[in-house]
Image (spheres, rainbow, N blue to C red):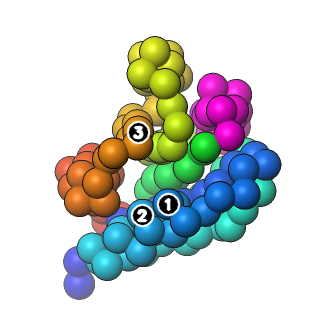
Amino acid sequence: MESRIRIVVAKPGLDGHDRGVKVVARALRDAGMEVVYTGLHQTPEQIVRTAIQEDAAAIGLSILSGAHMTLFAKVMDLLREQDATDIVVFGGGIIPEEDIPELRAMGVKGIFTPGATTDEIVEWVKTTIPTAV
């Protein structure tokens, strides 16, 4: 039996808009991945804990609040502290182009800005995230 990619999808911070993240979660699920959606208002600590407990291969963050630099950095720091840097982090939302190089330097592997299609995201995940063995 082929292993499926397991992804924790989360909405960190105080942003209360989750329609987009639910669309992405559904697209990933429809593409055969296991998706754990943690819901709104998650702390970076809750997200990392869930990803480790669920043995996730990736964390997908959706941030519309403008706090992406702080929240992505905290998730990346916590993954390092937990010796869990094998978990791939990607995300999307309202992220200015000028912030993308710094996010990549932090270790965020994929960044999807407004206009990215679910097909693009699914294809990126399939080609980037390793399946469990």
First in sequence: mark 1 vs mark 3: 1
Give the label on residue 20, or none: 1
Q: Position of residue 8 (x, y in %)?
A: 54, 62
Left or right relative to 84: residue 122: left
Q: Nearer the viewer, mark 1 or mark 2?
A: 1
Dot 3: element = loop
Q: Position of residue 36 (x, y in %)?
A: 55, 71
Q: Which residues are magenta?
A: 65-82
Residue bearing mark 3: 113
Residue bearing mark 2: 24
13 vs 51: above or below: above
Distance (Cα) linking label 1 and label 2? 6 Å
Magenta stretch: helix, strand or loop mostly: helix
Query: What is the quadrant of residue 70 in the picture?
Result: top right
Left or right relative to 74: residue 9: left
Distance (Cα) linking label 3 and label 2? 13 Å
Q: Is residue 109 magenta?
A: no
Q: Amino acid at mark 2?
A: Val
90 vs 50: above or below: above
Query: What is the quadrant of residue 110 in the picture?
Result: top left
- Residue at point 66%, 32% (across, down): 66
Q: Amino acid at mark 1?
A: Gly
Q: Position of residue 62 (x, y in %)?
A: 56, 50
First in sequence: mark 3 vs mark 2: 2
